[in-house]
């Protein structure tokens, strides 16, 4: 199967949307020979920080000389970003081969009257199979949505991780914070250790689930972070993520994972789009994947800590099913300037609606529908009808945030200009 046809097939599976449940992925993996049973795994759920923790764990394992696979979502530019071995993206030819294998099985399932797997289920199967075919010792697997009914919940990990629990995907996880916590606690397995940075009521629910399954529970926060370790990933929130990753790595009981290895790994780990700082033509540009209230709050904390007195100009795009009212309240200062655009998603919020909400907080804001036009206005200081040009100097921090579906395109544009 050539690459164009492979991507076309993968995109066609979008028509099936999101369908929680494990029946389809179980059948798909069985036909592939249950590849997930042929290596050890670490399962990572949580509202925020999942990707960063996965990247840290993958880097720790590979630095320790252990061959490690990594499956994360979503991608920013290329589907292949989701599947890596030792920090190297799956090759296009291998990606196409995996799609070919999965497509053959899906075609047979549908011909037999079965329900077609979704796109995420297909990608999960591809990643698990690719890890098996390449003989990894560990695979770090990020939950797509929730946990209990997520297609990644077919694995029995060496360690389960729940980074934290906040308001996101509530419509698919019970509609309450308690419901969200129960879905994330659904990845806990009998006798398997669990690491979490959750607090309050969500922590109580995780404790309850862990006790029921005799799963040893380790609760950490940024105070557990080892001070001598220098984090390559910026953002105040990464200290807590590092504490979680360190504890999970220690629980693997691998002799080659030493404090020195952990420190070296965290000093060199990379993860795109998380308080990522660029310098272009003397301007400071920050890309952050904050896409829910907790993420927005964490971004604001990092901006206030690291750039307290600099003027700020945002490129902001958000999905309509997110709580962008709260995101606006916690992220922006009255002095901020914001260009609002539409992320590359059918779920994108109307920029004009978001703009009106920003103006309710007396924040200067302008809607620009087209993402490329919005990017140019943001980076060049040229607005449209309401023209936002006041804070375009080199002293101004330029920040892109609000949706992972937007920042991928922004990173691509910045790469073209750098």
Image: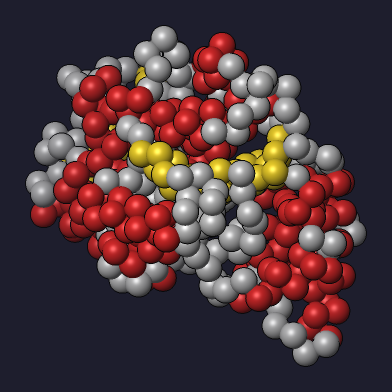
Tell me where residue 35 appears, x and y as whole percent: 79, 55
Is residue 58 shown left or right of residue 306? right
93 over 57 or under it: above or below: below
177 over 370 or under it: above or below: below
Residue under the point 66% across and 21% down: 255
Using the rendered view, name the quadrant where residue 39 is placed: top right
Tell me where residue 341 appears, x and y as whole percent: 37, 52
The foreground one among 293 and 21 is 21
The foreground one among 27 and 208 is 208
406 over 299 or under it: above or below: below
Asked whether the viewer can see residue 163, the reply is no
Asked whether the viewer can see residue 140, the reply is yes
Tell me where residue 151 appears, x and y as whole percent: 61, 64
Residue under the point 71% across and 35% down: 68
Using the rendered view, name the quadrant where residue 126 is placed: bottom right
78 over 246 or under it: above or below: below
């Amino acid at each position: 199967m050539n690459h164009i046809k492979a991507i076309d097939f993968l995109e066609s599976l979008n028509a099936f949307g999101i369908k929680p449940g494990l029946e389809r992925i179980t059948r798909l993996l069985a036909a592939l020979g249950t590849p997930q049973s042929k290596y050890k795994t670490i399962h990572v759920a949580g509202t925020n920080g999942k990707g960063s923790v996965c990247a840290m764990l993958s880097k720790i394992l590979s630095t320790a000389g252990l061959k490690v696979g990594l499956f994360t979502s979503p991608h920013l530019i290329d589907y292949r970003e989701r599947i890596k071995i030792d920090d190297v993206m799956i090759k296009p030819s291998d990606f196409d081969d995996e799609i070919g294998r999965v497509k053959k099985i899906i075609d047979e399932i549908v011909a037999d009257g079965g329900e077609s797997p979704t796109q995420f289920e297909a990608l999960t199967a591809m990643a698990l199979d690719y890890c098996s075919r390449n003989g990894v010792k560990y695979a770090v697997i990020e939950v797509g949505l929730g946990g209990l009914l997520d297609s990644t919940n077919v694995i029995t990990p060496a360690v389960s991780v729940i980074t934290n629990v906040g308001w996101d995907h509530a419509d698919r996880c019970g509609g309450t914070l308690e419901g969200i916590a129960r879905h994330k606690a659904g990845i806990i397995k009998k006798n398997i250790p669990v690491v979490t940075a959750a607090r309050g009521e969500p922590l109580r629910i995780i404790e309850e689930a862990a006790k029921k399954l005799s799963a040893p529970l380790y609760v950490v926060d940024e105070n557990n972070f080892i001070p001598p370790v220098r984090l390559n990933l910026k953002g105040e929130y990464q200290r807590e993520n590092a504490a979680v990753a360190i504890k999970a790595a220690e629980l693997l009981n691998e002799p080659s994972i030493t404090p020195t290895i952990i420190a070296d790994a965290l000093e060199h780990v990379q993860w795109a789009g998380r308080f990522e700082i660029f310098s272009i033509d003397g301007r400071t540009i920050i890309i952050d994947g904050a896409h829910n209230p907790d993420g927005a709050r964490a971004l604001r904390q990092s901006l206030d800590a690291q750039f307290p007195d600099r003027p700020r100009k945002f490129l902001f795009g958000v999905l309509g099913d997110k709580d962008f009212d709260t995101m606006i309240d916690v992220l922006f200062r009255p002095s901020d300037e914001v260009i609002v655009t539409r992320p590359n998603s059918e779920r994108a919020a109307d920029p004009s609606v978001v703009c009106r909400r920003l103006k309710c907080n007396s924040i200067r804001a302008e809607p620009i529908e087209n993402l490329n036009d919005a990017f140019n206005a943001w980076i060049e200081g040229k607005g449209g009808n309401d023209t936002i040009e006041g804070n375009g100097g080199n002293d101004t921090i330029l920040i892109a945030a609000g949706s992972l579906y937007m920042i991928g395109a922004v990173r691509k544009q910045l790469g073209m200009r750098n």
